[in-house]
Image (cartoon, rainbow, N blue to C red):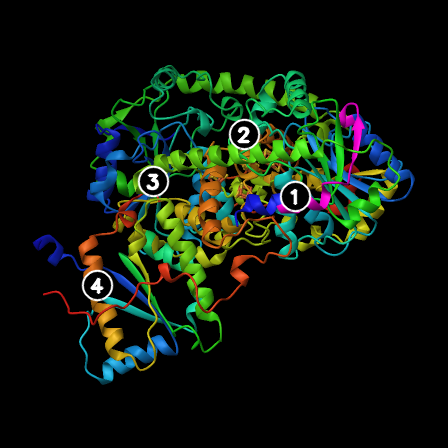
Amino acid sequence: MQTLFDSRMTMADFIAALFDKLEVAGVAAITKLPSGEKTAYTLLADKDDIEDCVPYFPAMPANAARAVSKLTREAPPSKQVAVFLRPCELRALTELVKIKQALLDNLFIISFDCAGVFPFQEISLSDEAKLKAYRDAVADGKNCEGIRPVCNACTRFVPEGADIAISFIGRGLDEPLALSFPSEKGKEAAKILGLDSSDNVETSPALETLAEARKKAEGELTKKIEETLAGTDGLISVFDKCISCHACSYACPICYCKNCYFDSQTFEYFPESYFARMGEKGALRLPVDRVLFHLGRLSHMSLSCVACGMCEDVCPVNIPVAQIFKTAGTRAQALFDYIPGKNPDEPLPLLTYAETELEEFED
Amino acid sequence: MTALDEVNMDNEVSMNKGIWIEGPVKKGILEFFSGLLSSKKVEAVLMPAKNKSKDSYAWFLMGKDGLLESAEPFPPVMTTQGARALSYLTKKGTAWKKTAVVLRPCELRATIELAKIKQVDLNNLVLISFDCPGAYPLEKYFNEDQKELDEIFGACLSEQVELEGARAVCSICHRFTGRGADIEIGLMGGEAKGFWLIPGSGNGEELLEGVSGSKPDNLEAREKKIAEATIQREEKRNNTLDSFRETVMGPENLMNTLSSCINCHNCSRVCPICFCRECYFDSKALSSEADNMLQRAQRKHGLRLPPDLLLFHLGRMTHMSISCVSCGACEDACPANVPVSMLFSLAGRNTQAVFEYEPGRSIEEPVPYKVFRFEELKDFETPYTKEYAKEQ
Amino acid sequence: MDEKNDFTPSILYGLCNWCGTGGSETAGALHLQYAENIRPFRVPCTGAIDPVYILRALIEGADGFAVSGCHPGDCHFDQGNYRARRRVAVLKTLLDTFGLDTERVWLRWVGHGEGKRFADTVNEFNDHIKNMGKNPLSQRRDT
Ligand code: SF4
Ligand code: SF4
Ligand code: SF4
Ligand code: SF4
Ligand code: SF4
């Protein structure tokens, strides 16, 4: 357990201190858009612009790991940039670093224990009732009604591997920030911020309560999804209304490929092949490879799935994609005793697969 | 000459031809296909059918023995845009067997646009379309009572009234008939008692030979109805787009409209016209180094990540709005409820007007980007009128 | 008024390798003076300027974007300038549709020997953009 300090700073003070004391060149976090309704993950490079920065606002309009990968993939910043990530986003970032899709050089990572987010469509800055309920839930260490199913069932909601971790749960979003500094870089920062042992505070017992509630919810979710997927037809029927738009993979932080294999020429066929396949079955659904895509994606990335929920948020036909990937991912990860994003030094276990073997799943 | 005149002119071709079939349209059409398949006039049909779980529709290529009981030539939603389905089938070559395809009018127009850029091969295809009452938003269809919605849709189709609760673009659709197809399924003017099969090409005529039905005596009345409805709908379209424009004009309004957009690009992935396997806006051309992004963030008081959101929308419009058929697929697939098909319909109406181009009107009409003229578009140049005296 | 004079617009000027660049060279040879805050850049042909470049410049900091190339009939590649004109027409129509300052984009033909016309265009465009003021589109963090 990391030592927790009472920083006596509000979030705004803290962000200002990042610029003033830690001398970062930029901060990336969820920020209010000028429209005043919606938020976006935004890179701010000027202390004068930080007023609208709301890192804990409960929406994930883009997985921040994907954003950080965009930011650093070509070349990392030459000065420190502080990035706020939710725990699942941080785990995704760690996975991306392992496969060289993001660079950590000069990044200062800030995370916090996370009470979950609402589906991004369902939360705006003006939704006062929802936001009030959320604030209360954070302070009480309870699951808030309306947060996404994968958040509800997320048991890894305390950050792993941040330089600074903020503790909200059981304390509230508006209290002075309680900070811990797990890394060497973080410990340096603690000194610069002038925090010492006289500032120590207790970890809230609410973290435990929430962990238990989450564990229970995870069990229920797993059971529900396993039942849905049971039998040879389970997977096929869940994805029966899938329109093959591949939004789920484009929004997924782990699916980093610019040209997804399943959108490549490999999956374009000559008309002959369509008619031949129709001939066998009398009827052929177009586009083909719908189920194959999901199985293939599972085989490509489920070991690294951090259950961030993005895929489900973007699915236009409301398929519980993230719940499925979380359930299947956890099972695959258990086989290898692998927890994605836990340890940056732990290499990705390799999984072998053969797409063609999966074709029998198509109708 | 307006587009409408042209449509009316084309009518004369089909005015005296066609077959009137009494009875419910879905049953009649399925029997028609079944006849075509068993007489081998066509060897396959591509049309939507209910999926296995019966909670949605999908495209199926069906052969003689496979004509699905669940086939639905007139589905109440557009899951995959039909032109896209057709391009999966024929992008790499001519359909192996003669195939009849049932498309909504906007899917037909997109098909013609795709044929112009070689993403669909029209050979060996018979295109069939119909008077479309509109389609429900996918979201509505998945969240409400499907049975009830199916019934309402069926009634609107046969009685030819605009579908209530249809997608925004459907409510302003002015090209709602199957004109331009090889065979047009005519419902408007038929007073819900039956439907016409009207050939639009030699290909269509061949297929209709020997189909039993009565001679259509009142096609003229149908044409009149269509002409009237077209004028009305055109006016509604223009008015709606004009007032929509008021709400999105200027950086402030436009960016507020796009503020819920998460830059996921799903709109372009489902758009039939955006056929590029690798979209420019997903390519390396737009990636940059962190320091560069920090500079941009400084200049603009912040940089939204992933970046280039407005560039994506406006840039996509420069690429394809000229061919946008207002099919609404983009908006259906948008997870953030951005009125993206309205934005593109508005953009398309205006860019198309510059070249008096109408996407999908005719395969003979080349896409404007491929046409070069010596003398035109003077208004878009800034003239050099006098020798300029520099301001002091 | 002073505010306007203080503002130095950021302007890009796309010139085709043949006439546009030729015009700028002729202007240089004639020692004609023109505004220095304009950043000219060469492209093989105006037909090679994708409107997306122009948009990107306008969204990311440019206050104006001008394009010059061979007069109709003189294009080194035959029809590149016609293509450019169609593309600019689409772009300006879109800017107009969404109320985004069409006049920040200019297309004007400049022939190889037209040094005076080149210098005049630079100066006129510069003054014109100064009068328009800073480009509001490039100041927003939500783009
Ligand atoms: S599969 Fe879904 S839940 Fe898993 S990492 Fe990707 S987007 Fe997140
Ligand atoms: S986002 Fe949904 S509809 Fe699209 S491919 Fe994924 S599961 Fe299918
Ligand atoms: S846009 Fe027009 S043609 Fe397309 S579905 Fe809607 S009403 Fe039918
Ligand atoms: S932009 Fe939207 S409305 Fe236009 S053709 Fe593409 S999907 Fe259809
Ligand atoms: S408009 Fe919708 S579908 Fe398109 S990029 Fe934005 S959020 Fe995605």
Query: Residue flagged by tag 1: what amino acid is it?
Result: Leu
Could you tell me how far apart the alpha carbons at marks 1 and 2 are, in whole angstroms?
18 Å
Q: Are marks 1 and 2 on the same chain?
A: yes
Q: Can you tell me whether the CB of the residue at mark 4 lies under 8 Å from the nearest atom of ligand 5? A: no
* Residue where numbered disc 3 is placed: B249
Q: Which mark is residue B167?
A: 2
Residue A279 is labelled as none
In the picture shown, does residue C18 fall above or below A41? below
Disc 3: which chain?
A: B
Q: Chain of mark 4?
A: C
Q: Quadrant of the C terminus of chain C?
A: top left
Q: CA distance from mark 4 to mark 1?
A: 48 Å
| Residues rendered magenta in the picture | B9-26
Q: Residue at x 36, y 54 (%)?
A: B290
- Are labels 3 and 4 on one chain? no
| Mark 1 closeness class: few <14, some 14–19, many ≥20 residues within 10 Å | many
As for residue B233 lying within the magenta part, the answer is no
Q: Nearer the viewer, mark 4 or mark 1?
A: 1
Image point (75%, 56%), residue name: B93
Q: Which residue is mark 1?
A: B108
Whether residue B221 is visible here, answered yes or no, is yes
Q: Amino acid at mark 3?
A: Met
Q: CA distance from mark 2 to mark 3?
A: 22 Å
The mark lying in front, picked from 1 and 2, is: 1
Dot 3 surroundings within 10 Å: few (below 14), some, or many (20 or more)?
some
Q: Secondary structure at mark 2?
A: loop
Spot the residue most to the left. Answer: C2
Residue that carries the numbered disc 4 in the rendered image: C126
Return the x and y of residue C71 as percentages of the image width and height. Answer: 38, 74
